[in-house]
Image (cartoon, helix red, strand yellow):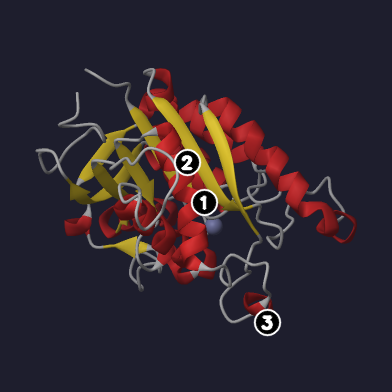
Amino acid sequence: MASELSLLAVHPHPDDESIGMGGTLARYSAEGVRTTLVTATRGEVGEILDKDLDPKEAAPRLASIREAELRNAVKILGVTELDFLGYEDSGMAGLPRNREPATFWQADEEEAIGRLIRVVRRVRPQVMVTQNEFGGYAHPDHIKTHRVAIGAFFYAGDVERFPGGEPFRPSKLYYTAFPKSQLKKIAEAMERAGVENRFSSDGEPPPFAVSDDRVTTWLDVSPYLEKKLAAMRAHRTQIPEDSWFIKLSEVLGPQAWRLETFERVRSSVDAPVPEDDLFAGLR
Ligand SMILES: [Zn+2]
């Protein structure tokens, strides 16, 4: 192979990377792939669920707390490099905060794309992974992450529109995806175990669920489950020990988080569907 393999993940907040693709980041890092995580915000208006913290006291310094949590998580996962786009968390949809100028939601899109393109041209990823068009669950930062990542994927090769640096075109673009069938299985198992679950097995699927036919890529991350769970736990303010995420793995065992799934939306190389490797067609 002429050039080193490089994977770029682009996510809105600290914790999205570990929940959606922690095992994947750990796997490729362990395989010697250059892995880069870009996080758009530092999640400064997120919840504070860490019982060792007084929420009132901790709220003003949540950005630095969550940055430290994220640095911890990427260290556990073995991620080569962590970068921030440098915007502020926009808060949940509909809040007045969405209109504050420093938030990611209000950021000039061209400028944000330009910032991400600088990273793309530097780390030259064949594979990019980000949020889908409804941002998982319609959080403004998730939607904006989607738009900015798409822009960078398509325009990193265009030095006329975005000058500076060597042009580079990534080969494959993916969205993290939680297929309905998996979520249903999990909900049923939680019900059988008599544990309260966040979505019932017979009701509406959760907002971030996607149809199974959108899922192209199924990665078995069993060998990296411990790292994934440790990285999730590193986000102490978001994922405390009594959280649903942790309970799930206690009740269901490794199968709860064994699969990480993606939707491949663009590829300039031949690769099968389904595939079990983000770099299929590139090695
Ligand atoms: Zn998020």
Residue at position x 14%, y 42% in the image: 274
Q: Dot 2 surroundings within 10 Å: few (below 14), some, or many (20 or more)?
A: many
Residue 192 or 281: which is nearer the viewer? 281
Marks 1 and 2: in contact by CB < 8 Å?
Answer: yes
| Image quadrant in which the N terminus is located | top left
Q: State the mark number for residue 275.
A: none
Q: 72 above or below 194?
A: above
Q: Provide residue 116's location: percent of width, then percent of height.
A: 47, 49
- The amino acid type, in three-letter code, at marker 1 is Arg
Q: Are marks 3 and 2 in contact (CB under 8 Å)?
A: no
Residue 22 in view:
yes
Other residues around mark 3 within 10 Å, as few (<14) / some (14–19) / many (≥20): few
Which label was assigned to residue 115?
1
The Cα atoms of the two marked residues, 2 and 1, are separated by 7 Å
Sequence-first tag of 3 and 2: 3
Q: Residue at x 32, y 58 (%)?
A: 184
Residue under label 2: 119
> Image point 59% across, 27% down: which residue?
75
Pointer 3 residue: 96
Is residue 131 placed above or below 80 in the rendered structure?
Answer: below
Asked if 92 appears above or below 213 in the picture, the reply is below
Q: At x 50% / y 33%, what residue is drawn?
A: 228
Q: Of helix, strand and loop, which one carries label 3? A: helix
Three-letter code for the amino acid on which mark 2 is drawn: Val
- Left or right: 1 in relation to 138: left
SS of the residue under disc 2: helix
Rendered location of residue 98, percent (x, y): 62, 76
Q: Position of residue 35 (x, y in %)?
A: 44, 30
